Amino acid sequence: MPPKRPSRKSIAAQSKSSSRRCRNEVAAAGADDDYGANDVSMMEGDMDLNDGDAESGTESNANDLRDLEESLKMSMVVDTGLRKEQRQRHLETDFENQVCVVQEKIEERSERRKREVDHIQDDFLTRLLTLSRRKSELETQIIKETQELADAYLGLKEEFEAVLQGRHEDVNEAITSLIKLEDAAPPKNSS
């Protein structure tokens, strides 16, 4: 905790109130000490009361005021430095807290996104495996049916070739028999 600093009254107001306080303290001290053996040193500087001269009292008060003003300035500088350090520490702490919060949010979103991506990839892999199985089943079916078609084609081809061969033989026999008939038939006269 920083040291408590003086009130924020203006320097002139502080000077007046402190000079009154000093005068009251001097008057009270003067009543007890006629010879000035116990000089009053309530403030930052010493007050010289032995003189009795009004000018030296005024100078002493002016010196005291200057000393008080310097002391006030120094305490304000120190307080400013302390407040600046506290503010800096506070800002750094807030910043670090915000960074932690943001990092946690980023990690949380990253994990959530990773889970979503993993889920989507799992779905795609499942679909891909299903489609691959279906593809292999279709390919097997296509190969089987193609083989059946090839076997049927070969069977039909052999039958067709046998039919064609039979027809060819029939046509050849018909031609041969026609030629024999023509040869056996008497020649026609041409008139």
Image: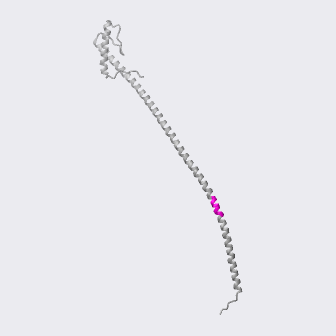
Q: Is residue 83 above or below residue 121?
A: above
Image coords of residue 21 (percent x, y):
31, 15
> Toward the viewer: 141 or 78?
141
Give the dominant element type of the magenta stretch: helix, strand or loop: helix
Camera-side residue of 81 and 116: 116
Q: Residue at x 39, y 24 (%)?
A: 79
- Check the picture and name the quadrant holding the N terminus: top left
Residue 34: quarter of image: top left
**From this viewpoint, is residue 59 visible?**
no
Q: Position of residue 83 (x, y in %)?
A: 40, 26
Q: Per the image, is 147 magenta?
A: yes
Vertical arrangement, residue 127 with respect to residue 105, above or below:
below
Q: Name the quadrant containing residue 45.
A: top left
The quadrant holding residue 87 is: top left
Residue placed furthest toward the bottom: 191
Residue occupying the far left of the picture: 54
Residue 135 visible somewhere in the drawing: yes
Report the residue at 28% width, 13% height from top: 55
Query: Image check: 118 left or right of 155?
Result: left
* Residue at (30% x, 18% y) in the render: 17
How many numbered dots are placed on residues in this image?
Answer: 0
Q: Quadrant of the C terminus?
A: bottom right
Q: Which residue occupies 49% across, 36% down?
A: 104
Left or right of 136 in this view: 39: left
Q: Which of the colour schemes (rainbow, by chain, secondary structure, one colour) is used?
A: one colour
User: What's drawn in magenta, residue-wise?
Assistant: 143-151
Q: Does 160 lie within the magenta span? A: no
Q: Nearer the viewer, residue 109 or 129?
A: 129
Q: Residue 13's x, y, as percent? A: 30, 20
